[in-house]
Amino acid sequence: MSYEVLARKYRPSNFEEVVGQPHIIQAIINSIASNKIHQAYIFSGTRGVGKTTLARILSKCLNCLSSDKPVTKPCDSCTVCDEIKNGRHLDFLEIDAASKTGVDDMRELLDTVQYKPSSGRYKIYLIDEVHMLSTSSFNALLKTLEEPPSHVIFIFATTDPEKIPKTVQSRCLQLNLKTINRDNLEAHLQNVINSEKIKHDKNSLALISDSAQGSVRDALTLLDQSIAHGNGALNEADVKALLGTIDDSLVSELIGAVVNGEAEKAFNIFYKIEELTPEYENVLKHIISFIHKVSLEQVLKSSNKEPIRNMAQSVDKEFIQLIYEIAVNSYSKFSIHPNPKEALEICILRMLAFNPLASIHDKTKSPNETLSEKKNLTQPVSNSNKTESFEIKQNIIEPEVKPNSPQPQSLKILSNQDWIAFFRELKMSVFVKNYYGNFTFLKMKNNEIHLGGDLEKNDIPLNVKKEFENICTEAFKAKIVIKLEQSITTEGPLQHEEKENKIKQEKAEDNIKNNDAIKNFMTKFDATIKEKSIKPIN
């Protein structure tokens, strides 16, 4: 006897064995128990979730000879159940719409509708992939579908219900099957493995469940392949090699390097992934999935995986969304790229290029650019409340200090006005500015800058904190530590800037409204000034 594949061997024979569709099963069982059986059903859902299987079980329930009326659980021992299971029952016609799309095929089928069933209660027509029927075929079916003989039931299975005409959908009871979640799939595979007495480890089943993407048939097919690949056993290494998957730790390290702006480290990890000869499209899927989990953890705090929790705590929410968009955009164009490896490399490069935190130690600029930036970044800042002044030499790029060059003047911040002036001269990412711009200067002791503000509203990610401390260290030419304390913020740099802008705006509006020439023009032509159209000159 030839080998029977697992997907066929473990096909459910009754509703109790169906995996992950309790809402559909309950609806069908209730309709049978109350003798309210619909004339036509549409089972819709992705591949391998049980559309055809449910149709066959329903057919057995309606025609089972174990009772004088339809049953909710077929006996699987009578001739009708056995014949439907093996696809040879005269009153159960299973038609493939992909091969019989024409109107002539539909007319031939409808000619048999008038004849009563030979041995069962109902004559059941199961049309698989019904959305592939032609428009003429659907039109020919409409009248019979609306008023079929009492002994006829139509069951349509489809992966694309939107292609079924609304006129057909309105005549049917539509039941949408869900994809199966990973836990249910893994439990189902565990039962199959136990029945087959296959040696295995838990991680291998988890990998297969992930790769199946909610399809029971795909999971069982992959399980078959994995058993053959492992010579009758399942182990994690063989399953990874078969599926072309990579270790989650490598993805975590890769994203961590990207977040920290460490280009060389990111590509060293990528080369490790390359040695595993994976499918690069699957690698990008893993990256997208990992970033998605980090985003959820930042909001829901529900992950039980330490790498995801650590990443969520250390990365800014906006930046995670940015690299997620870059990854998804790269995936959408993956199929048209001539080289999959290059497509993934350019995705990583884009993440690094758009990383505002990567500029802390950027050494890629030419000497001319570096010299120009040094001139622009070295500017005196006046202190309106004190007679003394200080000079800020802020430079994100590592300075080129010549042996005989004079050492920069040391900086001191004595007041909040000094802090605001210092902060405004720093070159930083928008993330740093939006976080630390809301804090007020409290004191500076040795190499510690103490800032006050609402710590609950300003939960600063570790990488943003690291960037700001590096920026301050560069400015002071000494290791600076930022200490945050809970306090009532009076006026941080952002509030000061907002106040300045408001004063400028009011001054600009007064200048326009009090200008005699403009007032005469408005009087002469009965004109008005458009609201919010006046802008101050920077």
Image (cartoon, rainbow, N blue to C red):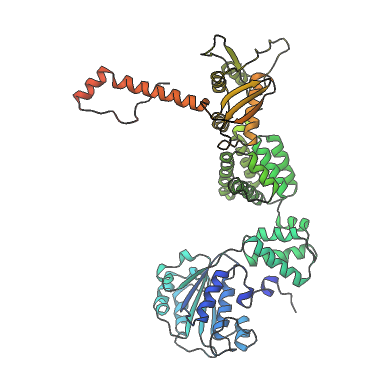
How many tags in the picture? 0
Instruction: Using the image, determine if residue 536 lies above or below residue 434.
Output: above
Left or right: residue 328 versus residue 167 is right
Can residue 535 be seen in this snapshot? Answer: yes
Depth order, front residue of 224/197: 197
Q: Residue 483, how many percent across, how many down?
A: 64, 28
| Residue shown at the point (62%, 46%) measured from the top left | 294
Depth order, front residue of 364/26: 26
Extreme residue in the front direction: 487
Can residue 364 be seen in this snapshot? Answer: no
Q: Residue 518, how many percent across, how many down?
A: 26, 21
Instruction: Using the image, determine if residue 143 lies above or below residue 251.
Output: below
Instruction: Using the image, determine if residue 374 lies above or below residue 260.
Output: above
Quadrant for residue 408, please give it. top right
Q: Residue 495, how many percent across, how many down?
A: 49, 27
Depth order, front residue of 410/1: 410
Left or right: residue 514 versus residue 396 is left
Quadrant for residue 222, please give it. bottom right
Q: Quadrant of the C terminus?
A: top left
Q: Quadrant of the N terminus?
A: bottom right
Q: Residue 36, how many percent across, how many down?
A: 47, 80
Left or right: residue 170 versus residue 350 is left
| Residue shown at the point (73%, 42%) measured from the top left | 271
Extreme residue in the left direction: 524
